[in-house]
Image (cartoon, rainbow, N blue to C red):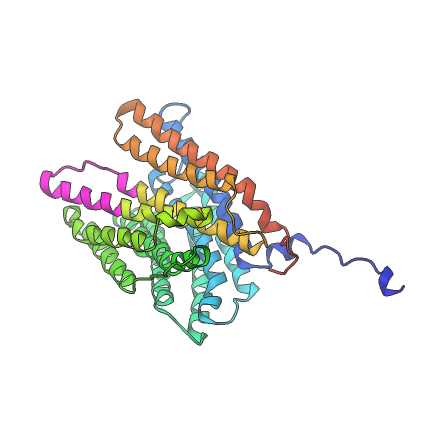
């Protein structure tokens, strides 16, 4: 048969497309988790107000919520992003598919067993956590290998390696809590996961990328990346963790106030107001602003404890950070990476913009619920969870198909 009559090349199969790039394999379960985790939590919240009997869980629902939010959601996006950018940042070797596929299998299998174990046996939960920890170790090995062999290394990568290692310690602490039922182990898992893993990772990625993206999108933009930002952040989160574990929350403001000031300063020098010239860029700036807001609330909470002996804010600062900063940054960064690596224009359409708007509304509703007693507070809490769920159902509908389809520009990856 002459060449002109030869059949066209067959379309690559599902697995070949899905495994073509690490962000595909990591972001898809992450997107699905944004829906599943809040569906679980909304079910629990409605059980608390009598819609149906409480879920028959082998662990407390609060402990489960903490684990899922810290270790069952964000790590998928973090590893997917870092597997992609580590080689680029440092001019290192690309992470082999065998390694990121192994991480995917271990983390996803671990999460499936975790959900099942919650209704069956704490032993199954422990096995799930062992698989999670194994996936984490493989991910750390992959990233550190790139770091160790790279021709150029920066301070961001060094601190990211330490923060990721702290995340593994957090999972190990939670595993110890499941096995021993030690409240201290669960507390260490929570504090380590939030303050020594998640906040440092998200801050460092933002510090590395927001000025770069801003310079790319805005005319006559002076890129400012304060070198003192990461070390100040590290000192503050370590101090915050120490005060919390030592049972001295009234003195946390010594760590929280400087971090709040640093975060707000970064938003200012990164020109928050100008970012609205490009929606996709503004999404990053809006999410980062929540760090300054959240840490300010933490500082106010601590000072109020010191002066009055009363906690007036409850979980307000936590949800400003958790929903506004962490979740908003995931939506902003993952949307950008997905669009760019699927061959699409780096522009946030109306629906993507509404997803971030929904996340911010969810944050405000959850904060308002903390100040609202009784049934009204429960309603606001449920509305916050529902707003999250609807927002991420929309996000999943928009973005999940991109991870299993070829790039629209025909390129590989």
Q: Residue furthest left?
A: 307
Residue located at (53% from left, 68% from top): 94
Magenta part of the protein: which range?
294-318
Side of 313 where 322 appears, left or right: right
Please tell me in which quadrant of the rendered image residue 38 appears. top left
Q: Residue furthest front?
A: 220
Q: Quadrant of residue 316?
A: top left
Q: Nearer the viewer, residue 220 or 144?
A: 220
Residue drawn at x 49%, y 52% is 336
Question: Residue 204 placed where, x, y %?
Answer: 35, 59
Viewer can see residue 413:
yes
**Among all residues in the image, which is located at the extreme right?**
1
In the rendered image, residue 44 lying in the magenta stretch gets the answer: no
Depth check: 59 or 71 in front?
A: 71
Task: Please identify the quadrant where the N terminus is shown.
Answer: bottom right
Task: Please state which of residues 187 and 193 is positioned toward the viewer in this rendering.
Answer: 193
Q: Position of residue 228 (x, y in %)?
A: 26, 63
Is 191 drawn above or below residue 161 in the view shown?
Answer: above
């Amino acid at each position: 048969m002459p060449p002109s009559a030869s059949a066209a090349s067959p379309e690559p199969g599902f697995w070949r497309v899905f495994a073509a790039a690490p962000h595909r394999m990591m972001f898809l379960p992450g997107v699905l988790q944004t829906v599943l985790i809040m569906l679980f939590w909304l079910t629990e919240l409605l059980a608390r107000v009598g819609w149906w009997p409480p879920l028959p869980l082998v662990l407390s629902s609060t402990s489960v919520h903490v684990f899922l939010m810290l270790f069952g959601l964000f790590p998928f996006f973090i590893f997917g992003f870092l597997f992609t950018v580590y080689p680029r940042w440092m001019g290192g070797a690309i992470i082999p598919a065998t390694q990121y596929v192994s991480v995917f299998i271990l983390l996803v299998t671990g999460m499936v067993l975790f959900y099942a174990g919650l209704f069956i046996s704490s032993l199954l939960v422990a096995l799930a956590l062992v698989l999670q920890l194994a996936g984490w170790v493989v991910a750390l090995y992959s990233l550190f290998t790139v770091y160790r062999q790279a021709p150029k290394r920066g301070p961001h990568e060094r601190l990211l390696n330490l923060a990721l290692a702290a995340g593994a310690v957090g999972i190990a602490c939670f595993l110890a809590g499941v096995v021993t039922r030690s409240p201290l182990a669960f507390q260490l898992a929570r504090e380590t996961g939030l303050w020594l893993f998640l906040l440092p990772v998200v801050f460092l990625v933002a510090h590395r990328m927001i000025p770069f993206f801003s310079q790319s999108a805005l005319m006559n933009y002076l890129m400012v990346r304060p070198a003192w930002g990461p070390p100040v952040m590290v000192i503050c989160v370590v101090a915050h963790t120490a005060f919390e574990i030592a049972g001295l929350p009234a003195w946390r403001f010594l760590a929280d106030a400087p971090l709040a000031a640093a975060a707000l300063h970064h938003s200012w020098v990164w020109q928050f107001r100008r970012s609205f010239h490009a929606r996709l860029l503004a999404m990053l700036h809006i999410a980062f602003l929540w760090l300054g807001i959240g840490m300010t609330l933490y500082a106010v909470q601590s000072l109020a404890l010191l002066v009055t002996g009363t906690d007036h804010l409850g979980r307000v600062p936590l949800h400003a950070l958790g929903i506004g900063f962490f979740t908003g940054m995931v939506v902003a960064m993952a949307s950008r990476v997905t669009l760019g690596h699927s061959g699409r224009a780096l522009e946030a359409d109306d629906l993507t913009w509404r997803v971030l708007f929904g996340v911010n509304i969810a944050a405000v509703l959850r904060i308002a619920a903390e100040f609202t007693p009784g049934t009204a507070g429960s309603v606001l809490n449920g509305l916050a969870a529902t707003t999250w769920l609807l927002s991420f159902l929309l996000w999943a509908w928009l973005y999940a198909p991109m991870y299993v389809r070829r790039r629209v520009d025909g390129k590989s990856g």
